[in-house]
Image (cartoon, rainbow, N blue to C red):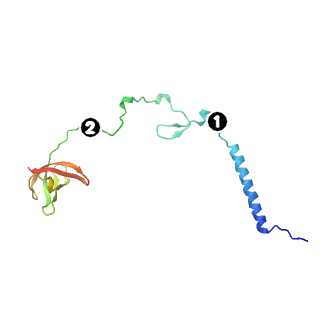
Amino acid sequence: MARSRETVGKKEKQKRKARKKQDKLERKEERRANNDKGKSLEEMMVYLDEHGNLTDTPPDPKKKIEIKTDDILLGAATLINEPYETERKGVVTFFNESKGYGFINDLKSQENIFVHINNLQEPVREKDKVVFETERGPRGLSAIKVRKA
């Protein structure tokens, strides 16, 4: 008798192939059964409630809020013009003349503000009372136009 040309490895490979094909058919049938096509527009609609959650119930028209288009501001926020003191008063807490910088303690807010020698209008020393303006620098507030009080 002649031996079968099919080996165990070939049989296993054919079984795996048949199993994959069967699984593929089952998935195809499941997709057909759960097909969402053919639904009406109302069934497919999703609404957003006041809390930002998705829901299938439409919003209550009684809770509707009218927004005037003129009230919507586009672009960067504008600053509200509040009375702002441009001149501040403070005391020099540290100043190094050789390095050319120091710090001023603002009397009102008690914050330390950096000052550079180029922004002095007259020479200052530690514990001098000064009047200055501030500007936003790369590392925070900087004092400018510094003069003795």
Circle 2 — which element?
A: loop
Residue 120, given in percent of the width and then of the height, sits at 12, 53
Looking at the picture, tell me which residue is in the foreground, 51 or 43. 43
Q: Residue at x 36, y 36 (%)?
A: 74
Residue 105, given in percent of the width and then of the height, sits at 16, 54
Q: Tell me if 8 is positioned left or right of 73 in this view.
A: right
Q: Which mark is residue 80?
A: 2
Amino acid type, callout 2: Ile
Q: Residue at x 60, y 33 (%)?
A: 41
| Nearest to N terminus: mark 1 or mark 2 | 1
Q: Residue at x 13, y 56 (%)?
A: 92
Q: Tell me if 128 is positioned left or right of 143 in this view.
A: left
Give the Cα distance between marks 1 and 2. 52 Å
Looking at the picture, tell me which residue is in the foreground, 77 or 43. 77
* Neighbour tally class for label 2: few under 14, some 14-19, many 20 plus, Cα within 10 Å: few
Circle 1 — which element?
A: loop
Residue 4, given in percent of the width and then of the height, sits at 85, 68
Looking at the picture, tell me which residue is in the foreground, 137 or 42. 137
Residue 12, given in percent of the width and then of the height, sits at 76, 65
Q: Residue at x 54, y 38 (%)?
A: 55
Looking at the picture, tell me which residue is in the foreground, 50 or 67. 67
Q: Quadrant of the N terminus?
A: bottom right
Q: Which residue is mark 1?
A: 39
Amino acid type, callout 1: Lys
- Is 135 rendered above or below residue 67? below
Q: Residue reaching furthest right?
A: 1
